[in-house]
């Protein structure tokens, strides 16, 4: 038997194919192992925004990875809903306790200030300070009661193009780029939706934005070219009472997210902004 024997060539070719298949199988398994590690670490770090590519996977694996990618978005939305509910409960308790303390302080100090024997005495200035502090605390609490006393949404067919045109008249100094083809209609509370979008536009203007882009891509994307939000701030922007503004109340975005939840939708900050912009917010349906 010689080296040119066709049987030897067939066996050699079969051996090469087996080795190649084994190497490819091993590499593919390593790829799946690395994916499992990345997803495990993401969940461990409470980062549910992971979306791994499906290229190079077999059709069954591709379907599973796509399902996991979609599930990560659902988990993130559900986490946001639980966070809103937790803040509502906490705010309800805090406002109740603070009002219980502030109300008698205001009424008693007011009564003392009305007493003629107090006027012109050294006590008057101190009582005025106490009264003003109590009234300021009451006003502070009343602002945050919005998180617990928000009315239910009245859903109706909303023409987004018309809503955005109304919004454009409120902020004429901004260049608006609206890309909804003028045909987007969906169920929402018109007033709440306008208030949420107005809050996002106001924040963008305060960040120095000159252009605001609103487009539809399986969700509503609201982008601006103002100063970007630092990563450490991005993690806190929906937390009630958190603000980086000297005169901010820290309630705007928390209230905006609550309003969207009342309408069966979620408001979140995109991991990556739309190309050409620095910040993108996403309004999407809750699972």
Image (cartoon, rainbow, N blue to C red):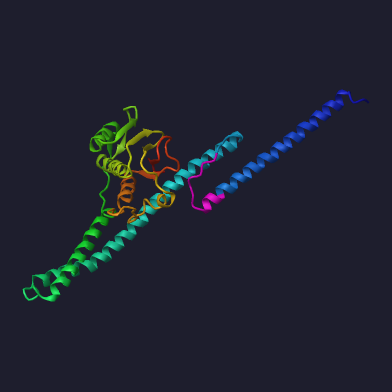
In the rendered structure, the answer to whether residue 216 lies left or right of residue 139 reads right
User: 218 or 130: which is nearer to us?
Assistant: 130
For the question of whether residue 176 can be seen, the reply is yes
Task: Examine the residues drawn in magenta and state their main secondary structure.
Answer: loop
Image quadrant containing the C terminus: top left
Q: Position of residue 221 (x, y in %)?
A: 38, 37
Which residue in the rendered view is the most extreme toward the left? 116
| Residue 223, quarter of the rendered image | top left
Q: Position of residue 101 (x, y in %)?
A: 24, 68
User: Which residue is depicted at the point 45% across and 41% down?
Assistant: 272
For the question of whether residue 108 can be seen, the reply is no
User: Which residue is depicted at the point 59% across and 46% down?
Assistant: 36
Image quadrant containing the N terminus: top right
Q: Is residue 218 magenta?
A: no
User: 113 or 259: which is nearer to us?
Assistant: 113
Q: Position of residue 44 (x, y in %)?
A: 53, 53
| Total numbered labels | 0
Q: Position of residue 232 (x, y in %)?
A: 43, 52
In the rendered structure, the answer to whether residue 33 lies left or right of residue 17 reads left
User: 78 or 19: which is nearer to us?
Assistant: 19
In the rendered structure, the answer to whether residue 34 lies left or right of residue 248 reads right
Q: Is residue 46 magenta?
A: yes
Residue 34's place in the image compared with 159, above or below, is below
Residue 173's place in the image compared with 85, above or below, is above
Give, as a single range, the part of the protein colored magenta: 40-52
Residue 275's place in the image compared with 192, above or below, is above
| Residue 134, quarter of the rendered image | bottom left
User: Which residue is depicted at the point 63% across and 41% down?
Assistant: 31
């Amino acid at each position: 038997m010689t080296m040119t024997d066709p049987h030897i060539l067939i066996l050699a070719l079969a051996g090469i194919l087996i080795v190649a298949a084994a190497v490819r199988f091993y590499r593919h398994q390593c790829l799946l192992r690395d994916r499992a590690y990345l997803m495990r670490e993401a969940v461990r770090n409470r980062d549910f925004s992971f979306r791994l590519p499906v290229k190079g996977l077999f059709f069954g694996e591709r379907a599973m990875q796509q399902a996991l990618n979609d599930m990560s978005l659902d988990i993130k939305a559900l986490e946001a809903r639980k966070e809103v509910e937790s803040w509502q409960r906490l705010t309800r308790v805090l406002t109740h306790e603070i009002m219980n303390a502030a109300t008698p302080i205001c009424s008693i100090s007011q009564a003392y200030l009305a007493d003629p024997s107090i006027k012109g005495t050294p006590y008057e200035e101190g009582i005025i300070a106490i009264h003003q502090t109590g009234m300021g605390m009451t006003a502070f609490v009343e602002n945050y009661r919005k998180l617990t006393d928000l009315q239910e949404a009245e859903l109706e067919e909303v023409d987004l193009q018309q809503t955005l045109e109304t919004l454009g008249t409120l902020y004429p100094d901004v260049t608006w780029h609206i890309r909804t083809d003028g045909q987007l209609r969906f169920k929402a509370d018109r007033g709440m939706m306008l208030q949420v979008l107005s809050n996002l536009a106001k924040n963008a203007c305060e960040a120095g934005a000159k252009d605001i882009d609103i487009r539809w891509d399986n969700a509503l994307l609201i982008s601006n070219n103002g100063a970007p939000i630092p990563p450490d701030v991005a993690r806190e922007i929906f937390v009630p009472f958190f603000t980086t503004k000297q005169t901010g109340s820290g309630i705007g975005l928390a209230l905006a997210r609550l309003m969207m939840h009342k309408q069966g939708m979620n408001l979140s900050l995109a991991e990556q902004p739309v190309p050409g912009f620095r910040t993108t917010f996403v309004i999407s349906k809750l699972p």
